[in-house]
Image: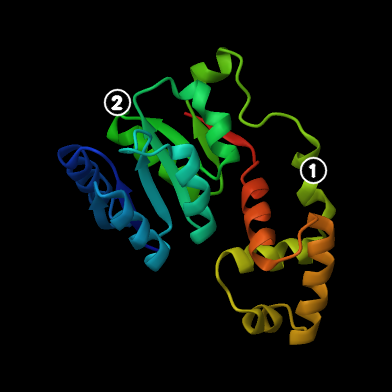
Amino acid sequence: MRKVWQVVIMGCHPTSMLGTKLILEEAGSLIVLGTFSDWEQGAAMVREERPELVLLDYCVPDEVIETILPGLKKEAPASHFVVMTDREGRELLLPLLKLGASGIISKGASPSQLLQLIEGLREGFLSMPLDWLEMGILPISASEDGDVLLKLTPTERFIMERIVQGITYDKIAAEIEVSRRSIDNYLRKIYVKLEVSTRAQAIEKYALYSRQVRPVYA
């Protein structure tokens, strides 16, 4: 049975959020936990529930989304954050991806375009309009950091995927049939390869670069 994704919507216009809520829940595999025009209340819900998907308005009242998004991603590293905007999304895509977003969509997008983007996230893909590519944008710019995941072995990647999903170390050990102490040894090696010193830093860095996958152009 397909997993039902929990969703939190954070925006400036209650009527618009209600319309988005209805679109998502009609899809059958999404449930909206709440719509929030109060940013602090919305952030508290994200921290508490860690939903699979968070839709948030680029126009944050009295705030700058570039300062809020990294904090939300740190609180809920396994959540997908999609930014809704009426600005030129092509210019915002790369900066927001680097801050922890999983995608960006125009407020004028059709219901089918929104659902297609979400469907892509379920399958591990980034969707974006084809004309952005024709205008010369690439979903991820080349950098040395882009090779960070190549340093990890398949087993190490599996462990990090499970950790990002919130799975306990004991359960991961059982899944790959090793001792709990072996997981600690794996983690020490992973920290060295990712050039981090804490679990939180490893999750943040892995979650960021694991999104650098092949795009699906909408």
Residue 154 found in image quarter? bottom right
Query: What's the distance in space between the residues labelled 2 and 1, CA to CA?
Result: 35 Å
Mark 1 residue type: Asp
Residue 33 found in image quarter? bottom left
Count up the numbered dots. 2
Q: Tell me the quarter of the image containing the N terminus.
A: bottom left
Identified at 84% across, 53% down, the residue is 151
**What mark, if any, has residue 147 been given in the picture?**
1
Vertically, is 87 above or below 48? above
Q: Residues within 10 Å of mark 1 (few under 14, many from 20)?
A: few
Mark 2 residue type: Gly
The secondary structure type at the circle numbered 2 is loop
Pick the front one: 115 or 101: 101
Vertically, is 211 above or below 110? below
Q: Mark 2 or mark 1: which comes first in sequence?
A: 2
Q: Residue furthest left?
A: 15
The secondary structure type at the circle numbered 1 is helix
Identified at 36% across, 43% down, the residue is 56
Pick the front one: 11 or 161: 11
Vertically, is 29 above or below 24? below
Q: Is residue 142 visible?
A: yes
Identified at 76% across, 64% down, the residue is 197
x then y, percent, for residue 53: 41, 52
x then y, percent, for residue 4: 36, 62
Q: Is residue 76 visible?
A: no
x then y, percent, for residue 121: 49, 46
x then y, percent, for residue 107: 31, 29
**What mark, if any, has residue 108 been given in the picture?**
2
Vertically, is 182 above or below 29? below
Q: Residues within 10 Å of mark 2 (few under 14, many from 20)?
A: few
